Amino acid sequence: MSDLILQLKNASIFQGGSLVLSKINLEMNKGDFVYLIGKTGSGKSSFMKTLYGDLPLTEGEGNIVDFNLKTLKEKEIPFLRRKLGVVFQDFKLLPDRNITDNLLFVLKATGWKDKDKMNTRVTEVLTKVDMNTKGFKFPHEISGGEQQRVAIARALLNNPELILADEPTGNLDPQTSIEVMEVLQDLSKNGNTILMATHDYALLLKYPRKTLKCDDNQVYEVVQRKS
Ligand SMILES: Nc1ncnc2c1ncn2[C@@H]1O[C@H](COP(=O)(O)OP(=O)(O)OP(=O)(O)O)[C@@H](O)[C@H]1O
């Protein structure tokens, strides 16, 4: 099996007919961690949306976890999403049920049937983010950082081949951002592949990794200087 998880060749991204990003070229292999940075409105979210099938790719080529983004059909999108773990800035937990039920809901929706296996899987992912003792709590009863850790656990449920994190620390204070970042770093050390959009430069300095910048409709690699 190839280690290539994501490949974009001259991929251009449009919103409402306007060019947002032109001719992106990118390869990500299993285990890579890549940052996507850029000012507000520079196209980070549009880039992410294209990768999880929310925005069609109309120009250039794109392959992600064995799906062709150019020919992706509406009915294939749920199957693409099952191979991706998507984490958003605003956590997107269901407010009307506790943490365990939030995760069980996703397992049910993605075809899991065996109750014991489902409970085991929920325990496994909550343990990875150190939230296993809080499964009975409702989202409003835990902090923002804890909610984001649960959202990461939810993204891990189906063993995704690629984690797409769109400003995962955008709503968190600096200390809590570091706690969430430590979780992502641990996942990366354990072989997970992660693309993270952020505008938090403090995190880039603390955890230097390959960095792509969206600016002036282009995406280019930024080389961080070691001080
Ligand atoms: N649904 C839409 N229809 C039309 N234009 C859009 C739409 N969504 C975003 N845009 C435009 O596309 C450009 C890129 O927006 P995008 O949200 O991808 O940027 P971003 O870098 O993620 O910004 P932010 O950090 O604020 O989320 C902006 O000019 C924005 O106004």
Image: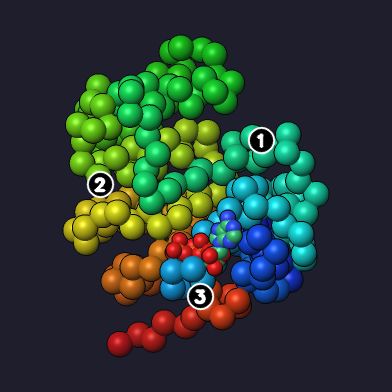
Q: Residue at x 21, y 36 (%)?
A: 142
**Residue 172 image point, x, y percent:** 26, 54
Crowd band around label 2 with a 10 angstrom C-alpha radius: few (<14), some (14–19), many (20+): many
Nearer the N terminus, badge 3 or badge 2? 2
| Type of amino acid at the residue the image marks with label 3 | Lys
> Residue at position x 44%, y 73% from top?
39
Q: CA distance from mark 1 to mark 2?
A: 29 Å
- CB atoms of marks 1 and 2 within 8 Å: no
What SS does tag 1 mark?
A: helix
Q: Residues within 10 Å of mark 3 (few under 14, many from 20)?
A: some
The x, y position of residue 54, in whole percent, is 62, 48
Which of the 4 image quadrants contains residue 129? top left
* Tag 3 and tag 1, C-beta contact below 8 Å: no
Q: Is residue 51 left or right of residue 106?
A: right
Type of the residue with mark 2: Gly
- Residue 227: image quadrant is bottom left
The label shown at residue 79 is 1
Q: Residue at x 49, y 81 (%)?
A: 222
Which residue in the protein does label 3 denote?
A: 213
Residue 12 visible somewhere in the drawing = yes
- The residue that mark 2 highlights is 145
Give the spatial CA distance, label 3 vs label 1: 29 Å
